[in-house]
Amino acid sequence: MHNSDQNILAQPLALPCGTVIPNRFAKAPTSEHLAERSGDPGTDLATLYRIWSEGGSGLIITGNVMVERRKFEAPRNPVFDAKTNPAAVQSYAAAAKSAGNKAIVQISHPGRQQQRGRGKSVAPSAIRLDAPWPLFGTPRSLTGAEIADLIGRFAETARIAVENGFDGVELHAAHGYLINQFLSPIVNQRSDEWGGSFSGRAKFLLEVLAAVREAIGPERIIAAKLNSADFQRGGFSNEDSIATAQLLEAAGLDLLEVSGGTYEDPQMIVGLQRRQSTIDREAYFLEFAERLRGETKLPLMVSGGFRSSYAMRAAVASGSTYLLGLARPLTLMPDLPNRVLAGESLRASDAEPRSKIKFVDAFLGSSWHNQQYARMASHKQPATDRGPFWTLAAGAAKLQRDATLYGRG
């Protein structure tokens, strides 16, 4: 590797809105389930994000901040709305930016991926999630008036984030959440202006982007997390993703995070992990990002799979991605960016337990990391010796406890 490649991760990145990211590391979104009962961020999240900020990432992206108090992905997601305490958001932003980096809020709505027992879920169409666990019910199709209201809620959440110290927002349009549901021809079977053709299915995302830009102004970051594909027959495809990225570029997006998959098919992510090209280069979606670079000039961030400092430098040096999105590696090694920037050659450790059942592993991995986040927020070292049975039992107990104690009114 050339000497110039050694320093490439320390180079700043100027986004179209004018904001400059100080280096090429980004803490990718993680759903930590650590908010207060009120929905405010609270001290646990502030502590955790201060650790990640001080670890050296040039950009911090928070996990799932809900735009509607009655609809959330997990019981302890933060919610930014009219009931939110501004001081709590200010403390959260200050912690996430404490080392001089930039920080943005991922804003999201679960749609049909809202867990049972918290009221009727909603979606573009009344299509139930096809997953082998009984957490999700059949959603109700949104009305036109409700869609307009939700667009306003995304804009209001973005305004609250920016007015209280964050540098912008990321629209969560991936992983089967509401915006992704509108984009999917499987989930969105509407025949009105919000469905049908590709342009109809993309309308909700573009309207949200326009409303958010009006709310936060031209000099703040608007990013989007977009699936390379949903990996379902007849679903959102690579071609759809490229066409969506081109629409987002024309609409003034600043940064595109490339990801993939939904709750319905985590097996495809496992399949990507096993490809020889992925094993060699680590990142799951790097090949698609390279294809996307030929179709759009949007700054790209690739998340998922990076572990070694060599692969990280190579990905940016080759131009395959502008930013490196790291999430799970920062659980056991929150100072990974600082160490790589200092010239250390390393590979992030991966201690999460696994079963041999793919859908179980999807919950198992999330539960294990959530448990480590809680320990980090309490200034404890990670518990790397927790096996699958202990992790699953603790995760199920936490879900039940949080659903009881942290229900939103």
Image (cartoon, grey):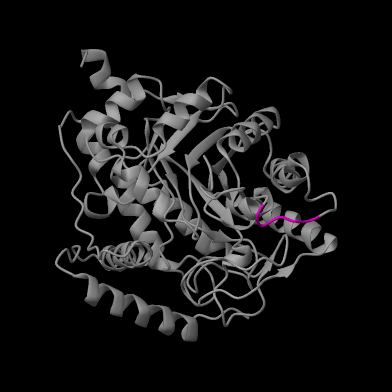
Residue sitting at x 71%, y 58%: 153
Picture quarter with the C terminus: bottom right
Q: Main secondary structure of the magenta part?
A: loop
Question: Closer to the camera, 73 or 196?
Answer: 196
Residue positioned 60% across, 45% down in the render = 236
The answer to whether residue 311 is visible is: yes
Q: What x and y, as percent, mark residue 207?
A: 75, 45
Report which quarter residue 55 is drawn in.
Answer: top left
For residue 356, side relative to residue 127 (left or right): left
Residue at the image point whose x is 44% and y is 51% from the top = 29
Q: Is residue 173 above or below residue 356?
A: above
- Residue at 40% of width from left, 67% of height from top? 43
Instruction: Name the residue furthest bottom.
Output: 404
State the count of labels.
0
Q: Quadrant of residue 48?
A: bottom left
Question: Where residue 361 appears, x then y in whole percent?
Answer: 32, 63
- Say which quadrant the N terminus sits in: top left
Name, please, the residue furthest toward the front.
233
Residue 294 relative to residue 337: left or right = right
Q: Is there any visible trace of residue 21 in the rendered image?
A: no
Q: Which residues are magenta?
A: 186-190
Q: Residue 262 location in percent, x, y?
A: 50, 55
Q: Is residue 198 above or below residue 161?
A: above
